[in-house]
Image (cartoon, rainbow, N blue to C red):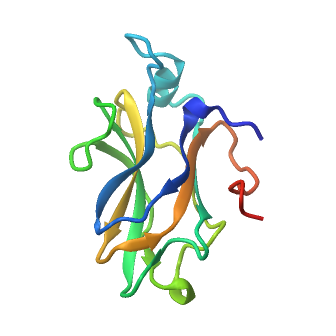
């Protein structure tokens, strides 16, 4: 499968961080350099053509882990009027379940785990910039990366990082 780099939030986007809400990767400008909404913005806001969000764990020796005590991580799709979506005021369109993060033995997100493969919700109007955020709770995640992108395909095969077999 070929992905458009303009529809990709991140490839091997690092999610190791202290407990906080963080932006992962880059935002997608739905106006694509124009001064008014383009086809992507129109598609997002009229809901006539499904667009899918795909998020997958694709890096780290054991997935997304913490160095000690257990914590959780969630992912969400947001939109905002600013290029780097605000972690507290951006419009939240979707939030994943909370996944347990601990050492490799107790980890809920292993290499290859599909975190999201969903049709983008259309209940709330999308603002200009789309982003993926991680909500890291309780403790610091010490390892893990994700790939996140938009696709017109409802399901695709597993996406592997270049250095993962």
How many marks on residues? Answer: 0
Residue 135 appears left or right of 113: left
Quadrant position of residue 7: top right
Q: Residue at x 72, y 63 (%)?
A: 164
Residue 137 place in picture, x, y as percent? 31, 71
Residue 144 place in picture, x, y as percent? 51, 66
Quadrant position of residue 85: top left
Looking at the image, which residue sits at the far front? Answer: 163
Depth check: 28 or 162 in front? 162
Residue 109 appears left or right of 127: right
- When the figure is inspected, residue 44 is found, relative to residue 98, above or below; the finding is above
Q: Residue at x 56, y 28 (%)?
A: 48
- When the figure is inspected, residue 98 is found, relative to residue 84, above or below; the finding is below
Looking at the image, which residue sits at the far left? Answer: 89
Quadrant position of residue 157: bottom right
- Quadrant position of the N terminus in the picture: top right
Q: Residue at x 34, y 67 (%)?
A: 136
User: Can residue 70 be seen at all in this image of the molecule?
Assistant: yes
User: Can residue 118 be seen at all in this image of the molecule?
Assistant: no
Residue 89 appears left or right of 70: left
- When the figure is inspected, residue 9 is found, relative to residue 74, above or below; the finding is above
Residue 138 place in picture, x, y as percent? 29, 77
- Quadrant position of the C terminus in the picture: bottom right
């Amino acid at each position: 499968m070929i992905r458009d780099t303009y529809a990709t939030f991140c490839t091997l986007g690092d999610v190791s961080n202290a407990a906080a809400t963080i932006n992962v990767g880059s935002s997608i400008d739905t106006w694509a350099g124009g001064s008014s909404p383009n086809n992507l913005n129109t598609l997002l806001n009229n809901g006539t053509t499904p667009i899918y969000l795909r998020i997958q764990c694709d890096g780290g020796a054991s997935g997304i882990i913490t160095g000690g005590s257990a914590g959780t991580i969630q992912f969400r799709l947001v939109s905002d009027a600013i290029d780097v979506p605000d972690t507290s005021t951006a419009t939240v369109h979707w939030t994943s379940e909370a996944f347990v993060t601990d050492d490799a033995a107790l980890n809920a997100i292993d290499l290859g785990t599909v975190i999201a493969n969903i049709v983008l919700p259309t209940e709330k109007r999308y603002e200009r910039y789309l982003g993926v955020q991680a909500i890291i709770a309780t403790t610091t995640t010490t390892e893990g990366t994700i790939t996140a992108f938009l696709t017109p395909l409802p399901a695709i095969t597993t996406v592997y990082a270049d250095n993962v077999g």
